[in-house]
Amino acid sequence: MPRGSVGAGQVSATSFAVPKGSLEYWRDRLTRAGVPVENAGTRFGEPVLRVADPDGLPLELVATDRARPGDAWLRGGVPVDAAISGFHSATLLEATHEPTAALLTDVMGFRAIGHEGDRLRFEAPGDEGRALVDVLSASHASYGNPGAGTVHHIAWRTPDDAQQSEWRKRLVAGGHHVSPVMDRTYFHSIYYREPGSILFEIATDPPGFAIDEAPEHLGERLLLPPQVEPHRARLERTLPPLVLPHQKTTEETHAPTI
């Protein structure tokens, strides 16, 4: 895929939560790995490091009280007091923020919890650890071009098909063009574009990724939905090989891809 460019109408940063006080560990780890690290300052009282993956995808590490060590993956060689424990937030880059903010609050039930310069922060309803999303208003920004190094869509989770159906009815009633329910084997999805043109997905938790392999072995083999299985040989040739850090051999494996 050709390289894309990040701009308005796209998710401009994917942020991960790490424990407070761990950014120096990450700065050292990334620098030793040859990854350029940028100090992005403090955002809503939380320090941020910014990096990019090999395709240019913007990523951030946020040192935050929201990091939950109990959710961290501890078999990758990172100590628990520094380990990533999931997403912190996503940043939506918009030419104008008002229509997107209205969708998040008036339709999707988010709550505005902060405002710094051109950045607004919203919090999803639910239990502790709920999602954050930032809307960054940048009227001067050019629109992004999709491709490698850009985010295709941002997905919100819902617990079951019944609630997803209610969300679809609510969105359609609000004048949004929503896709039919799409069976993705491991979950069911609907899609629509928010006013700034970022593609939103609402995906169900079930059936889940454990329907065709045991949870303790997730990611060790390339498992494909039935509709993609005929393309296995081509995919095995073209997908980048990955080595899981906890494997005791150097045998290469492929990440499960949907």
Image (cartoon, rainbow, N blue to C red):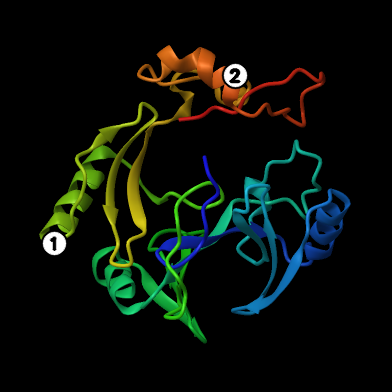
Residue depth check, mark 1 versus mark 2: number of the one nearer the observer: 2
Which element is circle 1 on?
Answer: loop
Sequence-first disc among 1 and 2: 1
Which element is circle 2 on?
Answer: helix
In the picture, measured across the screen, residue 188 lies left or right of residue 114, that is left
Type of residue at label 2? Answer: Arg
- Looking at this rendering, what residue extends furthest in the front direction? 2
Res. 103 image quadrant: bottom left
Viewer-side residue, 55 vs 120:
55
Q: Residue at x 76, y 38 (%)?
A: 76
Q: Which residue is mark 2?
A: 237
C-alpha gap between disc 1 and disc 2:
43 Å
**Residue 222 seen by the camera:** no
Q: Which mark is residue 175?
A: 1
Q: Residue at x 34, y 53 (%)?
A: 200
Type of residue at label 1? Answer: Gly
In the picture, measured across the screen, residue 249 lies left or right of residue 57, that is right
